[in-house]
Image: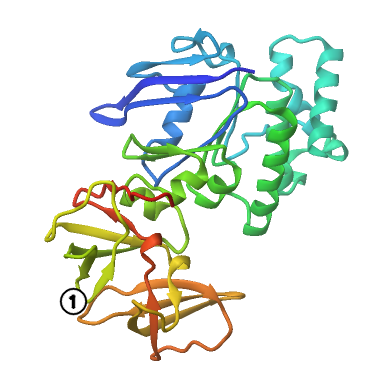
Amino acid sequence: MAGLSIRGARKNFGETEVLKGVSIDVADGEFTVIVGPSGCGKSTLLRVVAGLEELTGGSIVIGDRDVTALPPSERGIAMVFQSYALYPHLTVRENMAFGLKIAKAAKPEIDDAVRRAAGILNIEALLDRKPAALSGGQRQRVAIGRAIVRRPQIFLFDEPLSNLDADLRVRMRYEFASLHRTLGTTTLYVTHDQVEAMTLADRIIVLRDGRIEQVGSPRELYARPANIFVAQFLGTPRMNILAAVVADGGRAELADGRSIALPPLTAPLAPGTLVSVGIRPEDIRIGDVPGALAFTIGFVERLGGLVTVHLQGGGGSEPIACQLRDDGALREGEKIVALLPPEHLHLFDTEGRALRSGEPE
């Protein structure tokens, strides 16, 4: 196994710059997930690491080797695609063995590697079938098995679960996590699904428009987002963002004229400063407590045991979402009071950058 270092990676397609100086370090044995909206450069970044696209600028180092100019076959990587890319005319056994046969490995070595990978993935009974006879989840296991037999230094996964139904994605997430615990291979995993990122990653890299917005553990990014983009990209329902103006006495005035208490900041803000106040839906407290504000329930989304309630303030202000356990009592049009606890507020400046609290979150 080996770590991965990407330095100043740039990639242009004609006049379009897709990667704009991306630098990433993935530690040996780490499971790192790249997330971001469609078109942000996630898959392009994976393909330049794999050697399927040539860098316009920058370098890629795997272990202690600069592989920037090497072809894919010499980089020590194995890539699993969204489409699985299995050969339809070959059996599962032949698909898994294909890479080793091309590398002219000895037959006993190939047989042992296929047997080992099939055992890890619990697909021994499928070895003589062809891809057309397999379910989506089984095809995905075969694609992973084909990668495992090569014993790569680094696994690259490009949205491997996006073609599966919701229930199978949940089960396959568990299998990916279990596989990583078993093999411990350095992994770079691309997805647009924040749930996959939060559940699988040791570290998450948030990418937007070809640049890195933030890197950190799932908990760090969720609890201390660097900016509004990261704050709203991670979390469902997404973080509420309210326009506000700093007032005297550690408070801020919202767009509808009401005021709320702010958390202490490392650098106090002058009254009149424009800020954005963020709060996650699950951190809003329903109930008549000191500092609570009056709202009208505009819309109720019931999701089994949970309910998302959209609360409308005064003066045409934007509604805010609140998520809590569903006891069936809340109804649209009802009046309700809710607190935005200052210890759970996130503050952002006019550029969308986080203003750090003076107390740990």
Query: Which amino acid does the dot numbered 1 rest on?
Result: Gly
Q: Residue at x 34, y 76 (%)?
A: 291
Can you identify the residue that label 1 sits on?
257
Residue 192 spot, x, y in % from top left = 47, 47
Q: Is residue 184 visible?
A: yes
Q: Is residue 23 left or right of residue 1?
A: left
Q: Is residue 173 left or right of residue 204?
A: right
Residue 247 spot, x, y in % from top left = 17, 65
Q: Nearer the viewer, residue 81 or 77?
A: 77
Q: Nearer the viewer, residue 310 or 153?
A: 310
Q: Nearer the viewer, residue 68 or 267?
A: 267
Q: Residue at x 46, y 81 (%)?
A: 300
Indicate the quadrant containing the N terminus: top left, top right, bottom left or bottom right.
top right
Residue 319 spot, x, y in % from top left = 32, 75
Q: Is residue 358 left or right of residue 180?
A: left
Q: Nearer the viewer, residue 352 or 138?
A: 352
Q: Quadrant of residue 245?
A: bottom left
Q: Quadrant of residue 311?
A: bottom left
The image's colouring method is rainbow
Q: Residue at x 82, y 39 (%)?
A: 123
Q: Secondary structure at mark 1?
A: loop
Q: Is residue 136 left or right of residue 12?
A: right
Q: Is residue 52 visible?
A: no
For disc 1, the neighbor class at 10 Å (few under 14, some 14 to 19, many from 20) is few
Q: Residue at x 55, y 19 (%)?
A: 3
Given the current orientation, which residue lies at the most extreme front position?
249
